[in-house]
Amino acid sequence: MSTVPSGITRATLMKDLRLEWRSKDAINSMLFFALLVVVVFSFSFDPDAEESRHIAGGLVWVAFLFAAVVALNQTWARELRNQVMDAYRVSPAPANSLFMAKALGNFIFVCVLEALMTPLFIVFYKLRALGPAWELIPVAVLGTWALVVNGTFFAAMSLRTRSREIMLPLLLFPISIPAILAMVNATTAILLGGEGPDVSAKFWIVLLASYDVVFTTGCLLLFETVLNAE
């Protein structure tokens, strides 16, 4: 596996951040979609505080997952213009540098979405953590990375397919099931505190960390093959 030079990764990441800052395509699309999901869920459910703690973990992460797919679909699409992907293939820069820059960019975009939407979930569903609330931070970080690292990889794999907007969820959702289960169960355990399931949030956090290590390594090992595939 090639090394990942930090300079190339940083330059590519900053380029993507500047483009997003100018266009705001991904952020606006994700925010609109996530806000729509919050409003629809709020009309569909009218739970009290106790019921909210049981269902909020699933609702929150389902909303973030579907909103993230909107941004992930755009990850490589802009690189098709002016044969940028072909330029990446013939450049001496390692493929892993490009992949890490794209994954980190998506991670930042989704984290911004989560920071903006979480207060709305708290207000709409009257959420209050009975367990240690600080554990939600590693759950959010590890869970978000699990979604974006696989999403970035499969977005590149489905880039040249005829229906890439449909293909990405078909590839991403099944492989993300273990991570989604861990995120939902960890969030629910933290919100319920001692009233939650027997398995503590720490177990799910360790599971998420292991998942991230395995799939990040696998994506780095295989991305060069995906990039150079016709």
Image (cartoon, helix red, strand yellow):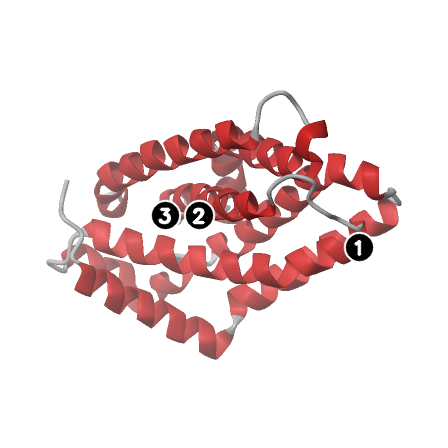
**Quadrant of the image occupied by residue 90:** bottom left
> Which secondary structure lies at badge 1?
helix
**Crowd class of label 3 (few under 14; some 14 to 19; many from 20; radius 10 Å):** many
Q: Position of residue 221 (x, y in %)?
A: 23, 37
Tell me if label 3 and label 2 are in contact, CB under 8 Å: no
Residue 32 image label: none
- Label 3 belongs to which residue? 156
- The residue lying toward the viewer, choosing from 88 and 137, is 137
- Label 2 belongs to which residue? 148
Disc count in the image?
Answer: 3
Residue 124 image label: 1
Q: How much space separates mark 1 and mark 3, taking CA atoms?
A: 36 Å
Q: How much space separates mark 2 and mark 1, taking CA atoms?
A: 26 Å
Camera-near label (2 vs 1) is 1
Going by the image, does 58 lie left or right of 134? right
Going by the image, does 40 lie left or right of 56? right
Q: Position of residue 1 (x, y in %)?
A: 15, 40
> Which secondary structure lies at badge 2?
helix
Q: Position of residue 49 (x, y in %)?
A: 83, 43
